[in-house]
Amino acid sequence: MAPRIIRNCAMPIALCLLFAAAAAGQAPAPAPPPSRLDIYGFVMTDFIYDERTNDPDWFDVNRPTKLPAFAGEFGRDGHTWAGVRQTRFGVKSYQATSMGELRTHFEFDFFGVGPDAGQTTIRPRYFYGELGHFGAGQTVSPFMDVDVFPNILDYWGPNGMVFFRNVQLRWMPIQGESFLTLALERPGSTQDPGVLAQRVEIADVFARYPLPDLSGEYRWGGERGYIEGAGIVRKIVLDDAVSDAFNLDDSIIGWGVNISSNVYFREKKDILRLEYTFGDGIENYMNDAPADVAAIPNPGDPVRPIKGKALPLRSLVAFLDHSWNDRLTTSVGYSELAIDNTVLQLPSAFHRGQYAIVNLLWQPIDHLMYGGELQWGRRTNFGDGFHSNDYRVQFGFRYNFSGELALP
């Protein structure tokens, strides 16, 4: 029957094929998945002994940029800390529509940053919606590979990792185990005035962002893991708002390349997490880095004696997550980030950060995890020969919860 329908059909071939499939008794298309609401999160408590000292606003994380830049900056060594700021709550929704499944993601924790640094307060992490090949809201940047983050207690994570949740509009033309994502992201940067901080000539120079940051990633996935390449390009404009003897207007291009991978062993019981990043003026996309731009001399030009420079950086992450059995795990690894400073930055400016961790975590029953972690961090300054080390022991207790609600 089916061949005769196709042979005698005067309609377009696509409609003929549909009729032929129906005549052959082909099963109808599967029904869309049911709409639902997933609620999840955990309550987490941390106890930390810090053998040295760091910025008290960042007492419960291992961040090399927050270690002392000179002797005695944060007082004497030896501190005990405790907190619940990692506690997290999230909701994901999945709703069937005529255009496909609509997904949303809302999540926050209690880790205060910015003006709330050091406080236990609500901090938004995800505000994101997605339908088909398009998404908008705050979620991880395509320049970031979230799967590089190891199974550790430290909240902040490897300092050399690209880590930035940003407001964006994204297009995902290829989805699945291998995928391609392109995005326009909210721009921004920070500038280091360095030794010129007290000069009135730069007091009225302001950063401006005429274009969004453009980022993209492609991941090739397979049974043994994946390899991912990501890139970003951005434009930073410096406007001199005062008409005087100097014109410090400037335009700076920032860019970056991020290459990352997960390698699976023993049916994913062991995962090697790797990342290498390099670029200029992309510090605010990194997990722990200072300013994106600093000044350099511009000899021979009396009107523009200085220019802005996008600071070059290089960073790496190498961690192994190992499962001893179904309940006991260990993560061990190292990360670092180095910046090529300019001669107009202060000698105490951040130059290099190093980070290392080893832990032992136990999950005695579902929804409960606790364990201990040894942490090391090191800060090296740019020009004065000073460096500071930090040695920390962290114990964490996490109680997970999750549930599902059907939606009409």
Image: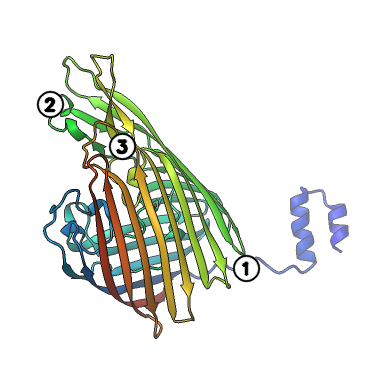
**Mark with earlier residue (2, 1):** 1
Residue 115 in percent (x, y) is at 17, 52
Residue receiving disc 1: 30
Q: Amino acid at mark 2?
A: Val
Nearest to the observer: residue 18 or residue 225: 225
Residue 11 in percent (x, y) is at 78, 49
Instruction: Classify residue 143 as left or right of residue 221.
Output: left
Nearest to the observer: residue 251 or residue 66: 66
Element class at badge 2: helix
Q: What coloring was used for the rendering?
A: rainbow
Q: Nearer the viewer, mark 3 or mark 1?
A: 3
Alpha carbon separation for disc pair 3 and 2: 23 Å
Q: Residue at x 12, y 26 (%)?
A: 200
| Residue 333 position (above or below residue 307) | below
Residue receiving disc 2: 200
User: Is residue 155 visible to us here?
Assistant: no
- Give yes or no for contact between labels 3 and 1 (Cβ–Cβ under 8 Å): no
Q: Residue at x 18, y 69 (%)?
A: 81
Q: Amino acid at mark 3?
A: Asn
